Amino acid sequence: MIQYIAIDPDRLQAMRDSGADESGNPWTLRPADGDEPLRCCLTWATPGEDIALISYNPWTQRSPWAETGPVYVHFDRCAGYSTPGEYPPAFLDYASMLNPFQPDGERAYGHITFLRPEDDHEAAVRLVLAQPDVSYLHVRSANAGCFTFEVRP
């Protein structure tokens, strides 16, 4: 079964507790405009909701492929993403890039896929993960390039 994985809530809590993200930027409260994709629970912020903009790197080990970038999360701990076996509904009509990786962690360039809002995102994920040289992938914003969530078989 395919797993759609938000940012680890314990990793985020460690940042909250330290008062800074892993790049040393202060954990700062900001009221949401209502158009921010939240990577902690894979939903969209509502206007006025307490959020933080942090620097985030989805890798947990050293890698030349590691990319750090800005992501929005809830300022305080939230319930996280509760249905990891389901493509996050909030992102089904979102311009996305499927960024696949081989088992050794190297990017599988031949399978990078750009999705328009009207595309079948779930079918595209299944197709990319079915490739023998693809082990997992990161879904990123096709517009801004920011990390959205991880997908593993």
Image (cartoon, rainbow, N blue to C red):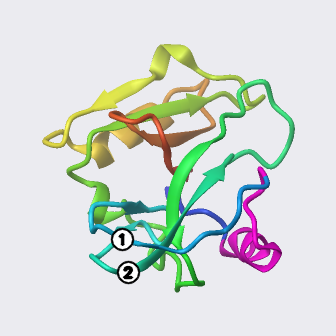
Q: Is residue 121 left or right of residue 127?
A: left
Residue found 82% across the figure and 73% down from its top: 18
Disc 2 on helix, strand or loop? loop
Picture coordinates of residue 111, whole percent (x, y): 46, 21
Amino acid carrying label 1: it is: Ala
Dominant SS type (magenta): helix
Query: Label 2 neighbourhood size at 10 Å, few (<14), some (14-19), many (20+)?
Result: some
The reply to whether residue 1 is in sight is: no
According to the image, label 2 marks what residue?
49
98 or 29: nearer the viewer = 29
Query: Label 1 neighbourhood size at 10 Å, few (<14), some (14-19), many (20+)?
Result: some
Mark drawn on residue 77: none
Amino acid carrying label 2: it is: Glu
Q: How many marks?
A: 2
Q: Is residue 143 above or below residue 45?
A: above
- Span shown in magenta: 9-23
Closer to the chain start, of discs 1 and 2, is 1
Picture coordinates of residue 84, whole percent (x, y): 49, 69
Residue found 86% across the figure and 36% down from its top: 62
The reply to whether residue 57 is in sight is: yes
Measure the C-alpha gap from mark 1 to mark 2: 5 Å
67 or 25: nearer the viewer = 25
Q: Tell me whether circle 1 and circle 2 mark residues in contact (CB < 8 Å).
A: yes
Residue found 34% across the figure and 71% down from its top: 45
According to the image, label 1 marks what residue?
32
80 or 5: nearer the viewer = 80
Q: Quadrant of residue 59?
A: top right
Picture coordinates of residue 71, whole percent (x, y): 52, 54
